[in-house]
Amino acid sequence: MAQSPNRTPACQLYLISPLDVGGAFPDRLARALDAGEVAAFQFRVKDIDEHAAAALAEPLQRICAEADVAFIVNDSISLAKRLGADGVHLGQGDGDIAEARDQLGRDVQIGVTCHDSRHLAIAAGEAGADYVAFGAFFPSETKSTEHRAELELLSWWQQMVELPCVAIGGITPANCAPLVTAGADFLAVSQAVWGDDEAAAVRAFLDVISAAPRDF
């Protein structure tokens, strides 16, 4: 998922799962990935044990592998290791980057939530993260948002730091263009895709991303 230090101007989609990934969701994921280029899919479930989470993750991981999409586990280093996932995404209270690297190896992508903080993002990069996530940029229906990030943060990061950055929080096709222009390397989206027709939503995002100018 991570880009090279000499980042290309392209912005890419990073899908985050809804909390309910049972039932027909594997078919929905396959349909979303068939609709256009997606860089990564984050498996995010809550309040179930690791065995149950692994059972839900396995068919989704296969779909991602077939589509050449990075499969990222939210929060859990142990689940990422169990699944042989492509990466893990850590919140500020979800574990240590060094521990994740030791457990998962140097080739696994490690992302870190940094809210609206330059300090947290710089620290994550220095500790060995492969990408940082900023947000929320807009009100989110997926989770409560205690922190609100501004577009200027993306512009500053793009100018100052080579590490890729992800924009997250309430992002839709209608509001994402300024994030692309400001410097987001990835748009992390959930409700805007899974709340309706997932294939149409992916296509709509990609249309906006391809048309949005980049300021650098």
Image: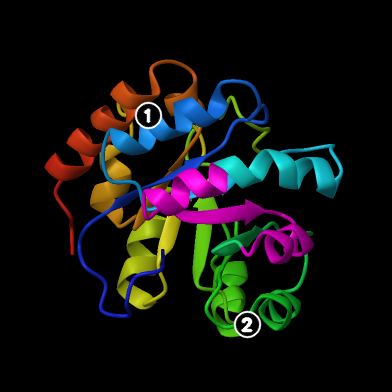
Where does the C terminus fall, quadrant-wise? bottom left
Q: Position of residue 64 (x, y in %)?
A: 46, 48
145 relative to 13 in the view: left or right: right
Q: Residue at x 18, y 58 (%)?
A: 215
Residue span colored magenta = 60-84
Q: Residue at x 25, y 28 (%)?
A: 204
Q: Is residue 197 visible?
A: yes
Q: Residues within 10 Å of mark 2 (few under 14, many from 20)?
A: few
Which mark is drawn over residue 127?
2
Q: Nearer the viewer, residue 134 or 153?
A: 134
Amino acid beneath label 1? Arg
Q: What is the spatial separation of the Cα atoms under label 2 and label 1, in whole angstroms? A: 36 Å
Q: Residue at x 22, y 57 (%)?
A: 10
Q: Residues within 10 Å of mark 1 (few under 14, many from 20)?
A: some
| Residue 100 position (above or below residue 175) | below
Q: Secondary structure at mark 2?
A: helix
Q: Is residue 112 visible?
A: no
Determine which residue is flagged by label 1: 31
Quarter of the image where one finds residue 2: bottom left
168 relative to 154 in the view: left or right: right
| Residue 147 position (above or below residue 83) | above
